[in-house]
């Protein structure tokens, strides 16, 4: 039972490979600074720095406060 608590709940994996995302033929990002967040019991998440995104193509969902992450805002295309 103790083995389950030896791993961190959240681990971050910075990437150095090129990440390119296009929506409807428009480039949303082209970066090597994305970070993969792995959290126990949750799907993988990819975080991309705002300055690496074309924010004009995004719509904010509004902000909220999460227990581990703090204040955050999700964006949608």
Image (cartoon, rainbow, N blue to C red):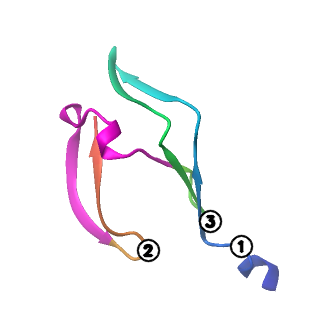
Residue 10 horizontal/vertical position (percent)? 58, 67
**Residue at disc 3, secondary structure:** loop
Q: Can the viewer see residue 71?
A: yes
Please say if the residues under marks 3 and 1 sit with CB atoms less than 8 Å apart. Answer: yes
Mark in front: 3 vs 1: 1
Instruction: Mark 3 or mark 1: name the one nearer the start of the chain.
Output: 1
Instruction: Mark 2 or mark 3: name the one nearer the start of the chain.
Output: 3
Q: Which residue is mark 2?
A: 68
Residue drawn 56% across and 53% down? 43
Q: CA distance from mark 2 to mark 1?
A: 16 Å
Q: Is residue 46 above or below residue 32?
A: below
- Which labelled disc corresponds to residue 40? 3
Q: CA distance from mark 3 to mark 1?
A: 9 Å
User: In the shown orientation, is residue 4 left or right of residue 9?
Assistant: right
Residue 33 horizontal/vertical position (percent)? 47, 42
Q: CA distance from mark 2 to mark 3?
A: 13 Å
Q: Which residue is mark 1?
A: 7
Residue drawn 46% across and 26% down? 20
Q: Residues within 10 Å of mark 3 (few under 14, many from 20)?
A: few
Mark in front: 2 vs 3: 2
Residue 52 lies in the magenta stretch: yes
């Amino acid at each position: 039972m103790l083995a389950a608590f030896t791993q961190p709940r959240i681990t971050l994996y910075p990437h150095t490979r090129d990440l390119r995302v296009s929506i409807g033929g428009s480039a949303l990002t082209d970066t090597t600074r994305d970070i993969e967040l792995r959290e126990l019991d949750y799907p993988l998440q990819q975080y991309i720095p705002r300055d690496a995104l074309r924010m004009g193509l995004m719509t904010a969902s509004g902000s909220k406060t999460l227990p581990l992450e703090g204040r955050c805002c999700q964006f949608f295309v």
